[in-house]
Image: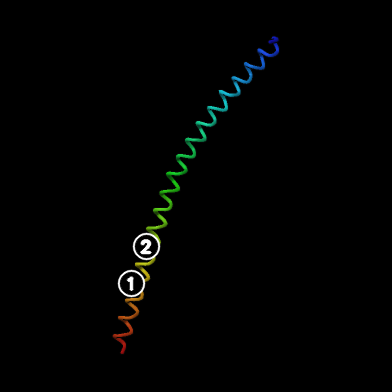
Amino acid sequence: MTYVGIFDEIEKKDENKALKKRIKELEGINKDHQKLNGKLHQENKRLKEDIDRLSEERDNYKTLAENKAT
């Protein structure tokens, strides 16, 4: 191995270290994203249930109002 080869190895080790650090950062971001995405899905489900409940209440109120009018 020449001296040039030694420096190439050092550069590769430094690059590998930086890439491994970046991978850990990205894995952390991915984990946080998954948690937030799960919370978003729960919130969407809750809102859909609220919409369904309110729609039913509205329909019941309309039916009651129509029955009183007759």
- Mark 2 lies on a secondary structure that is helix
Residue at which label 1 appears: 57
Crowd class of label 2 (few under 14; some 14 to 19; many from 20; radius 10 Å)? few
Q: Is residue 42 above or below residue 10?
A: below
Instruction: Give the residue drawn at x 39%, y 53%.
Output: 42
Give x and y (percent) for residue 26.
52, 35
Instruction: Give the residue drawn at x 67%, y 17%.
Output: 8
Crowd class of label 1 (few under 14; some 14 to 19; many from 20; radius 10 Å)? few
Q: Is residue 24 above or below residue 9?
A: below
Image quarter hosting the C terminus:
bottom left
Q: What's under tag 2, amino acid-wise?
A: Glu
Q: CA distance from mark 2 to mark 1?
A: 12 Å
Give x and y (percent) for residue 63.
33, 81
- Mark 1 lies on a secondary structure that is helix
Label drawn at residue 22: none
Instruction: Give the residue drawn at x 33%, y 84%.
Output: 66
Front one among 11 and 70: 11
Q: Residue furthest bottom?
A: 70
Sequence-first disc among 2 and 1: 2
Q: What's under tag 1, amino acid-wise?
A: Glu
Q: Is residue 66 above or below residue 25?
A: below
Q: Residue furthest front?
A: 1
Q: Is residue 2 above or below residue 41?
A: above
Image quarter hosting the N terminus:
top right
Label drawn at residue 49: 2
Q: Is residue 57 left or right of residue 29?
A: left
